[in-house]
Image (tube, rainbow, N blue to C red):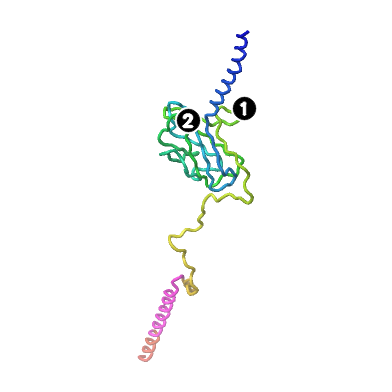
Amino acid sequence: MRRRLRHRSAAPLLALGLVLGAAGTAAAHVEVESPTAQALAVDAEVAFSAEGESSTAGITDVKVVLPAGLTPADLTLAKAPAGWTLAPTADGFTVAGPALAPGTAADWTVRVRQLPDAGSLVFKTLVDYSDGHTDRWIELPQGDTKPQHPAPVLALAPAAPGAIALPTGDVTLFAYTSSPPASPSPSASAPAVVAGGGEDGGSTTAVVLGSVAGVAVLAALVVLVLRRRRSAS
């Protein structure tokens, strides 16, 4: 009888231990939150926390894949462990620095120029340890099945009334090295063009007048010669 009671009392304890063990395993993950988790929020701070799962190795860096609507240029590092820095990557960013103590979480915060106009943002994350191990928090829910290594997701409230997306960059239509060129003065005009000539109208006119004068002189000489011949005869 006592053996049956012991067996019956041990079963719930074993089940509770399994539940607690599973909860302890699931608790080690990457979290993301923001006090301004709203679509189109400007200058928003987004905080991340990657739990240290290893009791013998510390976190050395964390790689984050940015969701659509965000680029590395939109982010600046606001807070991180001592000695850690942020570096852009092709699809997101990396925060890295001296290895943290085993079991210590890597907590950092980025400031975002503007959050996208979306209902939620998924940040797939890889956590690297000093012993070469990598935790991959990149899985998304499939139907009712909860992933074992879920990617951190930031839910966003709808955009505030009247909120608009900031321009992606300044567009320069005209570039000047110093000051813009001044408008032409009323006295400045295009060079006069003489019919039959080009822009050098004065030169063309001088040539024409010179030719006429030469012909007139030659004609006067011919008349003078003819008169002298008649007088001689």
Instruction: Left or right? Give the position of 148 relative to 221.
Output: right
Residue highlighted by disc 1: 145
The amino acid type of the residue labelled 2 equals Gly
Measuring from the top left, give residue 99's x and y in whole percent: 41, 33
Between 112 and 47, the residue placed more toward the observer is 47
Q: Is residue 22 magenta?
A: no
Q: Main secondary structure of the magenta part?
A: helix
| Highlighted magenta segment, given as a residue range | 198-221
Instruction: Left or right? Give the position of 129 relative to 137.
Output: left
Mark in front: 2 vs 1 = 2
- List the single residue furthest toward the front: 2
Measuring from the top left, give residue 75's x and y in whole percent: 49, 44
Q: Which mark is residue 52?
A: 2
Q: Say few, some or many: other residues with alpha carbon within 10 Å of mark 2 (under 14 / 14 to 19 / 20 or more).
A: many
Query: What residue is drawn where x is 62% and y is 43%?
Result: 157
Query: What residue is drawn where x is 37% and y is 88%?
Result: 229
SS under mark 2? loop
Q: Earlier in the sequence, mark 2 or mark 1?
A: 2
Between 91 and 5, the residue placed more toward the observer is 5
The amino acid type of the residue labelled 1 equals Thr
- List the single residue furthest toward the top: 1
